[in-house]
Image (cartoon, rainbow, N blue to C red):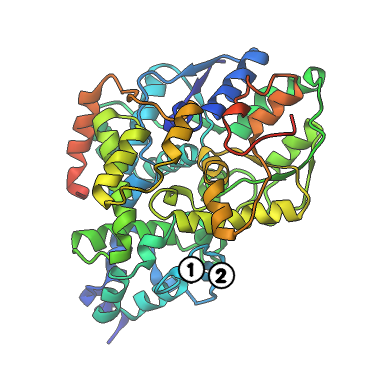
Amino acid sequence: MKTGLYPGCSLTGSARDYNESVSALAEAFGLELIQIPDWNCCGATAAHNLNKELSLALPARILALAEKNGLEEIVVPCAACYSRLVVTQHELKKNPELKNRISEVIEMDYRGTSRILNVIEWIDKYIIPLLPEKITKPFNYKVACYYGCLLVRPNKVLNYDRAEDPQTMDIVMTKIGAQPVDYPYKTECCGAGFSISRTDIVSKLSGKIIEDAEYRGADAIIVACPMCHSNLDMRRPDINKYWKTEFKIPVIFVTQAIGLAIGLSPEKVGLKRHFVDVKIS
Amino acid sequence: MSHSEHHIERNSLSYGIEKNVEVLAQKCYQCGKCSAGCPVADQMDFPPSMVMRLLQTEIPANDEKILRSNSIWLCVTCEMCLSRCPMEIDIPSMMDYLRQKSRSEKKVNKQAKNIIAFHKSFLNSIRWTGRLFELGLILDYKRQSLNLTQDVTLAPKMITRGKLHLFPNMVKDMGHLARIFRKTSNSSK
């Protein structure tokens, strides 16, 4: 079956490294990913904070385009986009009147039948079964798996992993040879969309997440969300200034770690684009 | 007054929330788990559990306090409160409603200025290109917030890492996007 890809805006810009690692894995494992034609932004936090109807219409257009192009299953590597798409599907399913209204707004048929996978589900389904014979360079490091908010919440809607102390990313990491540390900050918020408007809040919250990972002896923080990554990596100078310290721990996308374990180069999986040096490849 | 009579006369914020987002503030029994788990509670005028309590009173002065508070804007929509609420009260959806109400009634807290400027710049970017154009977003945000010197050293570093495009990557059918924005413009400005 062909899998559709909704890259979302971050993966084409500030999270290009994430995109490169997803593509590198798809290529290495012979997986076909078809970008949803003419996709638009999901609206992110801005739309649902300011305009509810728009926050449903934008994801609905994306899902309708996937349906129109025969993509029954789509992978959404950005945790924030993933959450918006699943929440929209859920809201329109439980409220047929709203579904009709949104179909009218987007001038498209919307059935709501797409199966939406987050990046870990995609890895579990397509990569894990082929992984054992592919590993050439086990990722023999202690890791703090940081899930953030939107990969697991709202948990009753996403219905993915458990809300407190989730395990799926930890299990993936053990399969490439890593040792996950016990990490209570797994699902704490990094400050998300406040990166520009309230950098102080992001610096404070992200600093706590980083400090605890270092305290527990992790060699790297593993993430599956471009927003978490940009806050923990790109905002590191602000974080260090806020906490008056020099946090050194690198922040690596789960797909980059798998790429390294199957012998792909750091360049190939985008590690050279990070702000915090990754010295463990 | 019987319960039903009380119900008919209600014109409170709590009633608006019930009608519009189907969240019942009355279900809250003040366990405080939302406030304990909220990452920004310490900076809020009222932490989430106190917002719930103020709503329950259905007193106009308290409704006013909520709509004018910084709490509704500092909420970062991490969804932790909902995840931990024993009554499964959807506080994040309620916060979305309160933000929109606070804006439409022009009661926005002054601390929300930059947060709203950012959201507006973000939506402007999508309105014009269909996808987020990060450089455009940053410039528009500077225009709206007047924080002109913020992050001036960050952009060049992003460019050298190939993380900031100088030109937008546009949706082809922008007419379609424009119609979606137009048709949904009544629900908010």
Q: Is residue A153 rendered to the left or right of residue A24?
A: left
Q: Is residue A204 rendered to the left or right of residue B23?
A: right
- Mark 2 highlights which residue? B36
Q: Residue A176: give x, y in percent of width and height.
A: 78, 30
Farthest bottom residue in view: B1
Question: Please, which chain is the residue tagged with disc 1 on?
Answer: B
Tag 2 near tag 1, CB within 8 Å: yes
Q: Quadrant of residue B141?
A: top left
Vertical arrangement, residue B42 with respect to residue A12, above or below: below
Crowdedness near tag 1: few (<14), some (14–19) or many (≥20) residues, C-alpha within 10 Å? some
> Which residue is drawn at the image coordinates 24% and 31% (left, top)?
B128
Q: Look at the image and tell me whether residue A153 can be seen.
A: no
Front-lying residue, A188 or B185: A188
> Which residue is drawn at the image coordinates 39% and 42% (left, top)?
B152
Looking at marks 2 and 1 on the same chain, the residue that comes earlier in the sequence is marked by 2
> Which residue is drawn at the image coordinates 51% and 47% (left, top)?
A157
On the same chain, marks 2 and 1? The answer is yes
In the picture, the disc for residue B41 is 1
Vertical arrangement, residue B108 with respect to residue B64, above or below: above
Question: Please, which chain is the residue tagged with disc 2 on?
Answer: B
- For the N terminus of chain A, give its image quadrant: top right
Q: Residue A194: give x, y in percent of width and height.
A: 43, 51
Vertical arrangement, residue A48 with respect to residue A106, above or below: below
In the picture, the disc for residue A201 is none
> Which residue is drawn at the image coordinates 21% and 77% (left, top)?
B9
- Distance (Cα) linking label 2 and label 1: 8 Å
- For the C terminus of chain A, give its image quadrant: top right
Kindly identify the amino acid type of the residue bearing the numbered disc 2.
Ala
